[in-house]
Image: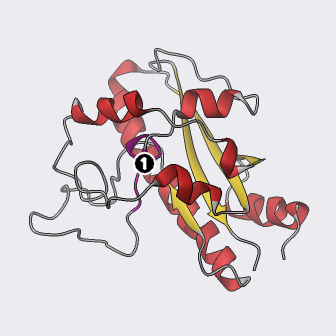
Amino acid sequence: MIENEELIQYFNSINSDAKYIFINPSELIFEENVKMNCYYCGRYNNNWRCPPNLPDIDYKQMMKEYDRGCFVILSFHIHDKKMYSEIRNESSVVLHKLLLELEKLMWKNNSSNSISFIGGSCKLCRGGCGKEKCNNPYLSRSPLEAIGVNIVKSAKKYGVDIKFPTDKHLIRIGLLLWQEE
């Protein structure tokens, strides 16, 4: 088992700009209304890791099966409103790749069942998702919002206050989950 201090040290070696907060996965707040925002997203039914393309899993129950979790938080200041869309896309990819690296660490340390969830929709494919199937099935991840996690309320329980609108300061939050084996 890896201790939190070891994890923080390793996490910081990958990205020292990120903030890492260890959580109890069973304390995440699930709300059905959060998933409704996915329906109004322009990527609805166009992203293989978002609704309605998610597997029929009881995500709240699934989260309770994990022993440990860590919010991975990245903050971005938006100096130019014209750059908002670009920063929004790039920040998603930066967070996504960081979470994949952390999954590798867990796998190398005997936690083969670790998994991560991103903040916002998967944007690994610059040209969008494949028409018939996911172009990156081993690398793509689903957003926390898509499985019903109210990330604003869940993060607040751990001292992270997300404010709207996000046109000046954007916070990206992902989640890494693992079991102690």
Q: Quadrant of the N terminus?
A: bottom right
Taking the magenta stretch, the answer to whether it contains residue 162 is: no
Residue 149 point in image, percent of width and height: 50, 39
Q: Is residue 145 magenta?
A: yes
**4 sits to left or right of 127:** right
Amino acid type, residue under disc 1 in the picture: Pro
Residue at (67, 48) in percent of width and height: 26
Q: Quadrant of residue 156?
A: top right
Number of on-image labels:
1
Q: Quadrant of the C terminus?
A: bottom right
- Magenta region, residue range: 141-147
Residue 54 appears left or right of 95: left
List x then y, in percent, for residue 102.
Answer: 64, 67
Q: Identify which residue is drawn at 38% across, 44% down.
A: 146
The residue labelled by disc 1 is 143
User: Is 85 positioned to the left or the right of 172 in the image?
Assistant: left
